[in-house]
Image (cartoon, rainbow, N blue to C red):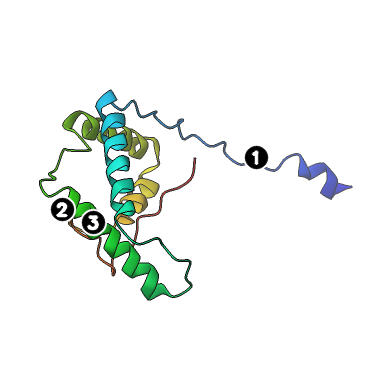
Amino acid sequence: MVALSTVGCLPRPEPETRRPAERVVAPPEFAEALATYAALRKRAQGELPPAEPSDDPTKVVARQRALAAAIRALRPTAKRGDVFTPATAAEFRRVSAADLRSRDRRDARATARQAPPVALRVNDTYPDHASLAPVPHS
């Protein structure tokens, strides 16, 4: 009887205090830039031989590299800001900063530490040795 009467006295877990995620309100030119890039990528795929299903990782990587080379060839003058314009980049930074502010400090630091230290440049290949930052589903 004593055990049953004390169950109701246990403290309840603290409710999640994290605020809802900010919504990205990307400028209209971002959708246009993505559509342009998607069309260019499709064109690059069309210039390659058809992809063959394969369990061989070397064939999969070779296909990825061939596609990347074809995209680079179609975008020889690509530069920073072509897809992520200054306005688009500012919006993504705003939402990212709001997300970090909504987390407790330990969680925010842990999230920031998960980003791999990779210097990215337009038309470069992402390094094979670099990990990918985990992105939680929403």
The mark closer to the camera, 3 or 1, is 3
The amino acid on which the numbered mark 1 sits, given as a three-letter code, is Arg
**Is 43 above or below relative to 63?**
above
Residue 57, picture quadrant: bottom left
The mark closer to the camera, 2 or 3, is 3
Residue, x 15% and y 53% (percent of image)? 121
Q: Is residue 76 left or right of residue 22?
A: left
- The location of residue 22, given as percent across then percent down, is 39, 29
Residue 81 circle label: none
- The location of residue 99, given as percent across then percent down, is 36, 37
- Residue 24 seen by the camera: yes
Residue bearing the label numbered 3: 70
In primary-sequence order, the first of circles 2 and 1 is: 1
Residue bearing the label numbered 1: 12
The amino acid on which the numbered mark 2 sits, given as a three-letter code, is Arg
Residue bearing the label numbered 2: 121
Q: Secondary structure at mark 2?
A: loop
Q: Secondary structure at mark 1?
A: loop
Q: Is residue 78 left or right of residue 83?
A: left
Query: Whole-Å distance between the Cαs marked 3 and 1?
Result: 57 Å
Q: Secondary structure at mark 3?
A: helix
Q: Residue furthest left?
A: 77
Residue, x 40% and y 40% (percent of image)? 103
In primary-sequence order, the first of circles 3 and 1 is: 1
